Amino acid sequence: MLRRSVLFLVFALFYGIPVLTAANDWTPPPAELVSPAQLNAELAAVKSGKIVLIHVGFSRMYQMAHIPGSHYTGAGSREEGVVGLRKLVAGLPRRQHIVIYCGCCPWKDCPNIQPAFKILKEMGFTSVKSLDIPNRLGDDWTAKGYPIAKGE
């Protein structure tokens, strides 16, 4: 058991996954969620730039599978992710439709959605939503047959 725990910690540290974060019990307000079915139906709006879709999770996850048209800014729980997020949205109108997602784990354990959501709201964005993936991207998006892209 100890060996398994040590291996998990080494893996997590290697891939930059926070392992000592407390459960945050935060979920986005229902009015600020977009369902996978709704976003899938609006992928043309993502492609055209009407909706800015941002992956705020870990790099390795984005490379393995992400929603087509999404921008990667870095993990919302990390300073470089915060800098990347601010840089991406800096010149956008504050009424721009923005959807963020992570998908690394269930909402209660996700270290990335809440900080990214909070930053965008603090920057004055009024149309920010989170993709409703309460479990993980594989369960709540990919398993439903919605499209994914791989790589950068």
Image (tube, rainbow, N blue to C red):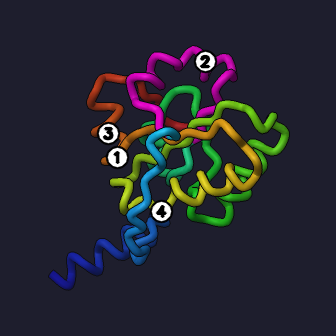
Residue at left offset 48%, top offset 31%: 67
Cα distance, mark 3 to mark 2? 23 Å
Number of other residues with Cα within 10 Å of mark 1, as a class: few under 14, some 14 to 19, many 20 or more: some
Instruction: In the rendered structure, find residue 111 and report the number of the disc placed on it.
Output: 4
- Magenta segment range? 33-54
Which kind of residue does numbered mark 1 sit on?
A: Pro
* Quarter of the figure with the N terminus: bottom left
Q: Quadrant of residue 81?
A: bottom right
Query: Farthest residue in the right direction?
Result: 91
| Residue on which disc 3 sits | 138
Disc with the residue nearer the chain's start (4 vs 2): 2
Dot 2: element: helix
Residue toward you, 82 or 6:
82
Whether pointer 1 and pointer 4 mark residues with C-beta atoms closer than 8 Å, the reply is no
| Residue on which disc 1 sits | 134
Residue toward you, 109 or 3:
109
Whether pointer 4 and pointer 2 mark residues with C-beta atoms closer than 8 Å, the reply is no
Instruction: In the rendered structure, find residue 45 and report the number of the disc placed on it.
Output: 2
